[in-house]
Image: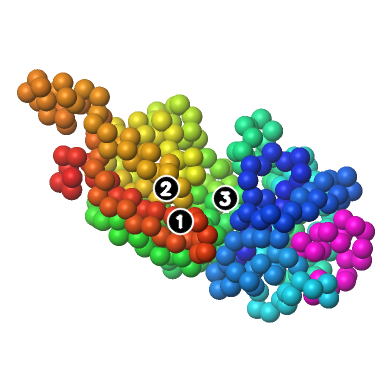
């Protein structure tokens, strides 16, 4: 079980929450010239209630503020009213995101945190990539300041190493239900080749690997691809391959065709903006009998499903000429069902799994 918490420097080009969830309670502090905005909120940890984890975040935040103010780092955060007592804690990772290398300025803070919180197994300074557009969580460098560079998580009977900037579902318990739902939706056969796009640390791909012949994962974050490969080895899975690739680029389809065989089933789990036009085009041409679309944004999911279910260009002309819609290069998909999954209780957010079958296949 683990907790991953992020702080960001005020000048870092990060769009949205500084931690896992949004909060309106920010406070700017300066640590030896490195200006940071702190936030007391975080995600859900396996084996911990939201309140317990929130208290941990508040306690660490208090140390950040006190250290920046030059107060004694040895003063217990519990005496300052944080309400946190470290009893059988989860593993904790802290990720300080900055616009420049902050290792020098953070050294004193790291020492203070390590002294007070034995459950902190990893502290990382991630330096934002200034060459990428604002809002993209691109990292130019990742510096390990304390401990090991990953958390350990267990999901669906598998063990995962999760690096600071690799995607991993924050609600680990509910993630197990989500991945079980994905497996049911895929309806895999032992001979199937599966393609998992936006695969992160390989959680979905590896949870499906024992149900199919081969699974290929594609991910843009280099550290996540390295995590996925280690996770396959850690769990003794030898039929999973993980590739580094940016699916938002126009050449995404060419990248995929050049490195993966024709898939029988494709799973996609994109970020909130949804699928790029290049990925939509690839999916309509890849020949998969079934698509499983996992989304944290129902609006962009609905938009993409409509595009995948639209009649392909040239289909009407093919039918009028005595052929069938299947004679054109692009396939048309039919929405079979959608199942929401409450990953973020007491919030407006919901995860949704949509199943689309290729028109003309034995399923469609």
Would you say 50 lies left or right of 122 here? left
Question: Which residue is painted at 33% across and 50% down in the image?
Answer: 354
The residue wearing badge 3 is: 166
133, 183: nearer the viewer: 133
Q: Residues within 10 Å of mark 3 (few under 14, many from 20)?
A: many
Could you tell which of marks 1 and 2 lies nearer the N-terminus? Answer: 2
Spatial CA distance of label 1 from label 2 is 8 Å
Spatial CA distance of label 1 from label 3 is 21 Å
Q: Which mark is residue 298?
A: 2
Q: Is residue 229 magenta?
A: no
The residue wearing badge 1 is: 350
Question: Which residue is painted at 46% across and 44% down in the image?
Answer: 270
The structure's colour scheme is rainbow
Residue 285 to residue 337: above or below: above
Q: Say which of marks 1 and 3 sits in front.
A: 1
Q: Are marks 1 and 2 in contact (CB under 8 Å)?
A: yes
């Amino acid at each position: 079980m683990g907790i991953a918490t992020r702080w960001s420097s005020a000048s870092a080009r990060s769009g949205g929450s500084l931690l896992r969830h949004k909060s309106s309670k920010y406070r700017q502090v300066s640590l030896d010239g490195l200006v940071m905005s702190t936030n007391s909120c975080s995600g859900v940890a396996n084996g911990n209630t939201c309140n317990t984890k929130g208290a941990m975040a508040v306690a660490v935040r208090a140390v950040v503020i006190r250290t920046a103010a030059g107060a004694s780092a040895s003063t217990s955060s519990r005496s300052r009213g944080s309400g946190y007592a470290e009893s059988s804690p989860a593993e904790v990772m802290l990720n300080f995101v900055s616009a420049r290398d902050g290792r020098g300025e953070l050294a004193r803070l790291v020492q203070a945190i390590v002294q007070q919180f034995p459950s902190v197994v990893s502290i990382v300074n991630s330096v934002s990539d200034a060459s990428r557009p604002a809002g993209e969580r691109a990292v130019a460098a990742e510096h390990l300041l304390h401990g090991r560079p990953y958390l350990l998580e267990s999901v669906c009977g598998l063990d995962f190493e999760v690096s600071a900037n690799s995607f991993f579902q924050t609600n680990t318990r509910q993630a197990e239900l989500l991945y079980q739902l994905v497996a049911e939706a895929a309806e895999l056969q032992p001979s199937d080749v599966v393609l998992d796009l936006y695969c992160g640390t390989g959680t979905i791909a590896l949870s499906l690997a024992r149900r199919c012949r081969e699974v290929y994962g594609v991910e843009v974050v280099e550290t996540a691809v390295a995590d996925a490969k280690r996770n396959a080895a850690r769990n003794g899975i030898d039929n999973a391959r993980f590739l580094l690739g940016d699916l938002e680029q126009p050449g995404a389809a060419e990248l995929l065709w050049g490195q993966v065989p024709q898939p029988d089933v494709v799973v996609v789990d994109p970020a909130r903006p949804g699928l790029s036009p290049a990925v939509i085009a690839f999916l309509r041409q890849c020949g998969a009998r079934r698509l499983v679309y996992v989304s944290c944004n129902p609006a962009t999911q609905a938009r993409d499903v409509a595009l995948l279910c639209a009649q392909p260009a040239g289909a009407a002309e093919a039918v009028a000429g005595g052929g069938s819609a299947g004679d054109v290069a692009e396939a048309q998909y039919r929405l079979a069902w959608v199942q929401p999954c409450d990953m973020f209780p007491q919030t407006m957010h919901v995860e949704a799994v949509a199943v689309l079958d290729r028109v003309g296949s034995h399923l469609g």
